[in-house]
Structures are given as C-alpha cells and as structure tokens.
Amino acid sequence: MKDIILIAPPAAGKGTQSKLLQEKYHIPHISTGDLLRTATEQNELGDIVKKAMETGTLVDDEIVLKLLETRILKNDCQNGYILDGFPRNIKQAESYLKLLNKLNRPLGDVIYLDASKETTMKRIVGRLSCPTCGAVYNDQIEENKPKRFGTCDICNGSLRKREDDNLETFNKRYKTFMEETYPLVDFFKAKGCLFIVGSGISKERTFNEIEKIINRG
Ligand code: AMP
C-alpha cells in the first residue's frame, strides 16, 4: 500500500479519517504532534520544544524530521503509513522529499481534505462534550445538537465547551494554516500526487472518496 499524507484545515476531519484508515487498512497513523508530545513526556526533548507546543508555534524542523525518520523506519511502517500534521510548510515538504530519497521510499498519495472555513468554524466553535461519558455534540450543526440544551442525551451529564474552542483561536489557527500549509496543495499538485476530497458533508462520504483514491488501479 502507498503511504498517505493527509493535509487539511483545522477540524476538517484529518484525525477521524486517519483513524478510519488505520482500522481498515492496518497501517499506522503517524501524527507529528503525538510524536512530539510523547518525546516531551519522556523528557527526551527540552523546554524549548514544550514551549513551542504550548503556544502552538512550530517546533524546529530538524527535531521533527529526526523523530519522523526514527518512526518510519520501524517495522510496522513497511506496508505504508498515514501521515498527519506533517509537512506543515514547503520547507518541511522539501526536507521530507530528501528523506524519502535517502530511504529509497516513494512519496505515495497526498490527499487534501477540503472543507469551507464556515464548516470548520462551526465544528470547532459549536463543539460540546460530556465530561461524564465522553459523548460529543455540536450546538451549531442541526443534526449534532443534543436533544435538550446543555444536557447529554446518553447520561444526562452537563455538557461543556473546551476553552480553546473559541472563535479567536479558530481564526488564528485557520490563518496559520492558509499562510503556511495551504501552499502545499500547489506544491504536491506540481508533483502529480495530489488528490482533493470534499470533507464538508459526512465522515462516511469522505472515507468513501479516500478509499476510491487509494484503491484505484
Ligand atoms: P498537532 O497535534 O498536530 O495539533 O500539533 C501540536 C503541536 O506540535 C503544534 O502546535 C506544534 O507546536 C507541534 N507540531 C506538530 N507537528 C509539527 C510539525 N510538522 N512541525 C513543527 N511542529 C509541529
């Protein structure tokens, strides 16, 4: 199976689709955010990295590249992997191509999950979750609203909003994405490996489209 790189604006469904792909195709989901979190928890990386992660700025490319190289050399990546959160910008994409060249590994498919700013904004700003049972709702999307305002349908718990799920944080993340990461769409298009999938309707529909791409002849 080819490696898969998922690129998407915040809340376009990258995490969800990665999980679905991992379950169905038994290839690992590699999130550079998770790799960095694990490394900082194990004290392998210093305070500078922790600070960058806390403030949402990018960690030094060399550190991310090194962690990624170590991860993709593991046995479970032999049959492919799903890359989520990397590359974040053109410079990282160029370094990644050099790494693949060194490892003699083809690039694979790059899939852009396309969802409008309005859709992703509603997903983030309207997100509510139940601290008791973990159920997730959305008060801006009709079909995901709880039946009773502020109350969990499953366990009657009081629903909560995450502090960083607000319009200001969303706008900041979206702007960074458009400025730094979105140019990768043209970068990979020029390499002939880019596919665009609409991710604004349902996760099932999006997954179906992704499967058509990765299973094409
Ligand atoms: P994420 O889990 O993808 O939201 O990433 C969490 C944080 O990890 C980001 O805000 C960055 O500080 C760092 N990070 C994740 N991926 C990268 C990357 N490709 N390059 C640099 N920093 C990254």
Image: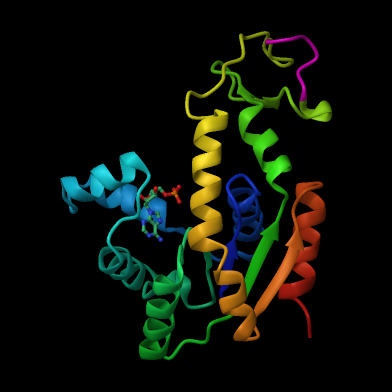
Residue 117 point in image, percent of width and height: 68, 46
Q: Is residue 84 left or right of residue 1?
A: left
**Image coordinates for residue 200, horizontal then vertical, percent:** 77, 49
Which of these two is toward me, 193 or 209?
Answer: 193
Whether residue 29 is visible to the viewer of this picture, yes or no, is no
Q: At 33% across and 40% down in the image, what residue appears? A: 55
The coloring applied to the image is rainbow
| Relative side of 142 to 44, left or right | right
**Residue at left offset 43%, top offset 91%:** 104
- The residue at the point 61 percent across, 71 percent down is 185
Nearer the observer, 116 or 100: 116
Position of the C terminus, as image quadrant, is: bottom right
Horizontal and vertical percent position of residue 97? 44, 83
Q: Position of residue 103 (x, y in %)?
A: 38, 87
Tell me, yes or no, if residue 124 can be seen here.
yes
Report the residue at 37% width, 72% height from top. Answer: 74
Residue 25, placed above or below residue 166:
below
Whether residue 103 is situated above or below residue 48 in the rendered picture = below
Magenta residues span 145-150
Of the pair 28 and 111, the residue shown nearer to us = 111
Q: In the rendered image, which quarter contains the N terminus?
A: bottom right
Identify the main secondary structure in magenta: loop
> Across the whole image, how many numbered discs are drawn on residues?
0
